[in-house]
Image: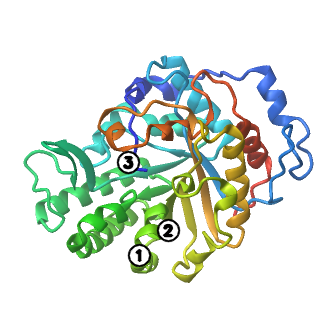
Amino acid sequence: MVIVRYRYIALFLILAIIGIVFISLYNENRLNMGRDNDIDTNDNGQTLPISKRTFYIGLVPTPRNSPNSSFEEIVAAYEETGRIAEICMIWVRDQGIGEYELLKKNRVIEAARNYGLKVFVTLNFATIKKVEGGLKYVIDAPQGIPANLSDPVFRSRWVEEARNIASEFKPEYFSLGNEINDFFYLNPDEFNSYLSLFEEAKTAIKSVSPHTKVLVVFSYNHLVENGQWNMLEEFNDKVDLIGLTTYPWKQFNTPKDIPDDYYLRLRKYVSKPIAFTEIGWVSDPPSSEKQQSEFLLRFLELTKGLDIEMVNWLFLHEIQIQGTVGMFTNPRTGTIALKKSDGTEKDIYWLWIDLKNIPLKEA
């Protein structure tokens, strides 16, 4: 899905120096008990289809009671994400030109690193805006800068933005566009301009942060629906990773309906490691928490043959999707979370803990 932004992130001005810990004794016991051996069947009778893990797992640390979260609840969400994941997806209000200054002010990257998380940053070049007559997918340029991927002023400023973020924060992962195939499905004539812009930005990033892995992210749903496989081939030799979001609930009634080769077909087009930056299944009717868990099990089974760098579930806590994004995003998407808004664990939460407790064997 297109990046969902929530507005409480600025409250982290002093988070990096706060040592608040919100770990209940009950949850700590649940996290640690019975994990001396390989993953076994959990309390709900669900067994993971893997016994070893070579990929990181991650989350967006959405807090309890969004959109009315307290500062303490926001801190707790980052702390919990640090316990049950390895990667933090950094989502902020502005993810185009201007993101660098925002990240310096809100200090969310410090917050993530304070809890031992690897950082995943996205710099977008386009956004969906409300215009007369509806919504429009447009180049995201500040006032005074031409909104054109071919314009030298825009290109220079966007590359500078990428370089500044990389130099200041040294993120482990840096995506130069989220679900980019959606924009180029509507604007195919701009694809070649973006290819060269990507390469300029990647060079700038590597010059100041050589260990940062640079990628772009595609919507897998729409790659399949629109037959955009050629875009994977175009980027395969240019990126460190191929990024994908995947939400099969939009295409299939149940996880069992996902074809056995649904993900394995990627091997025909991709030789680089794959980053599943957003995965998930809704839990509200006509779906259920059980189906949500079944999807995670099905996903892990169907991707066994792939070289995977990371698997990121969407949200920690359920959220209400508001603003412009809420106008084009299915409101059910807010239920793709490990916990309910009030902090209650869903069935999938403990399955996720089982996954986290599989020892990570890094390459």
What residue is drawn where x is 44% and y is 37%? 331
Instruction: Pick out the residue farthest to the left.
Output: 144
SS state under label 1:
helix
Residue 317 screen position, x and y as percent: 57, 31
What residue is drawn where x is 55% and y is 79%? 271
Residue 14 screen position, x and y as percent: 45, 23
Q: Nearer the viewer, residue 77 or 329?
A: 329
- Cβ atoms under marks 1 and 2 closer than 8 Å: yes
* Residue on which disc 2 sits: 242
Residue 187 screen position, x and y as percent: 23, 67
Q: Give whichever of discs 1 and 3 has the lower sequence position.
A: 3
Left or right of 280 in this view: 47: right
What residue is drawn where x is 52% and y is 21%? 65
Disc 3 residue type (three-letter): Glu
Q: Nearer the viewer, residue 354 or 333?
A: 333
Disc 1 residue type (three-letter): Phe
Left or right of 44 in this view: 158: left
Q: CA distance from mark 1 to mark 3?
A: 26 Å
Q: Alpha-carbon neighbours of circle 3 within 10 Å: few (<14), some, or many (≥20)?
A: few
What residue is drawn where x is 32% and y is 39%? 327
